[in-house]
Each structure stands twice: as C-alpha cells, then as structure tokens.
Image: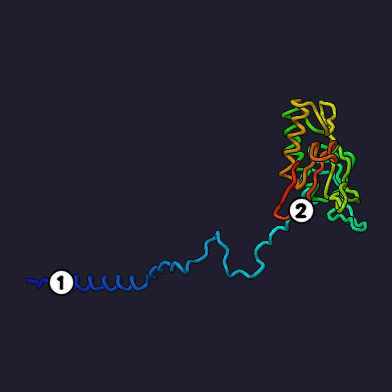
Amino acid sequence: MPMRRNPAPFVVGGLLSLALAAAQAAEDVVPPLPPPRPDRAAPSAAEPSKDKPAGSEAQAKPEETCPERLTRLGVRFETRPPIQDNACAVQDTVLVSSLPDGFEVSPASLMTCPLAEGLVRWAREVVAVEAERHLQTKPKKLLIGTSYQCRDQRSGGKLSEHAFGNAVDVMGLEFDKKGPLTIGTHAEGSPEAAFQDAVRKGACPVFNTVLGPGSDSDHGDHLHLDMRARKNDYRICQ
C-alpha cells in the first residue's frame, strides 16, 4: 500500500513565500510626505514669490500730468510757456478754447492748468445741470471778461490772482435754445435769477474764491472765480 505524503510543509512554505513577497513590496512603496508646516507653506500660484529678483514686477503707471487729464476730459487747449512779467508769473500755462461737451470758452483764455480743471468740474457738475433744471437748455458758450492780466487787486495793495493766471471773470453765458444771460441783477423769482444763484453757489466747493453781484461794488456784473490758496483751506464765497 503506497504511503500518503503530508501536505502541511508545502502549505506552510507557500504561505511564508507570500508573506515575504508582501513585506518586500511594502518596503518598495514610498510613503507620502507630511503636509508642510504653516510657517513654511509653499507660495500659491496667485501669490508672487518673495524670492523674485528686485524689479521683476511691473512698474507702477506714472501719474497723469494736468495737461494729460485735460486731454482725456476733452478740453481743447494749447500748452504755453511759463509767464514771468516782473512780479506777475504763470506756471502750468494753458490757453483754453473749449470745455468738454462743446462748451466754448470765449475768448480763448490763458490760465493755469489747475484752474482749467476747476472750470471743467464746475461746467459739468453745476452749470450744465442747473441750465437744464432752470432754463431747460444746454450751455454752449462761457463768456470770459478777464483771465490772465498782470495787475493789482482793484482794492490795491497786492497782486490780483489774475496776475498769476489763477482767476477768471465770467461775464455771462450763451445757450442752445435761449438768449444769452449776462451776470448781474435779474428779476427776483425768475428762472434767470435762480440759475445765476445756483451756479454761483455751486462754484463755491470748486473754487477757493467766488465773488459776484452784491458781494462788493467791484463784482456787480461778473462772477470772479479763483484758486487762491489760503491757510487751513479757508474759502470766500460771496
């Protein structure tokens, strides 16, 4: 009768071989790296690395000059050389012939560029709005009496802001669908009186000096607007 072989040694040997293979495979697997410490987190794609060489970022856009702003706003003007006439002097000199939206300046007037910017703001935010509200029309021409003029104040004693190109005298306005309006005395309660009062008051936040009819004997027929700088931003609005 043939002898039967005990299978146990083969089974045990096979199991040992499988265990050794599994252990070897486990040794070949690279364990995952731990997450970075919060204080050493890698820079994200949205954040530039602090290790970039100096000057690698785009340089800041230079600030616009005053004439560049006038051009962008749609002002028609010519730049002029600085003026020096004894004590009278004008810097940032421009000759303005038209404000935005076809609002003509007549005659073309010599002034500082910042004063021209003030006229643009006043024309757009005040004059055009009040002309539509009170007169139901659009302003088309700003009538200027004096802009740059080398002279003293009418009261004497010191140079006028006109001597620095820093003031204009508005004598009146013309409109699309209405006759011209002259600065002066208008019938109380009339649309013209309401318009003149509104544009005069609306000029006060824009200009540092606003003088008109009733302020004194020298300004009964025009609005004097200037950008004279005073201590503590003191303004005169009369």
Say which amino acid is labelled 1: Ala
Which quadrant is home to the C terminus?
top right
Using the rendered image of the protein, determine whether residue 188 is visible from the camera's viewpoint: yes
x, y percentage for residue 175? Answer: 82, 30
Residue displayed at 67% across by 67% down:
55
Query: What is the secondary structure assignment of the residue under circle 2?
Result: loop
* Residue designated by label 2: 229
* Residue for point 30% across, 72% down: 23
Front-most of residues 88 and 104: 88
In the displayed structure, would residue 166 be above or below residue 36? above
Give SS at disc 1: helix
* Residue of label 1: 8
Image coords of residue 66 (percent x, y): 78, 52
Front-most of residues 82 and 13: 82
Q: Amino acid at mark 2?
A: Ala
User: For this rendering, which residue is in front, 97 or 41?
Assistant: 97
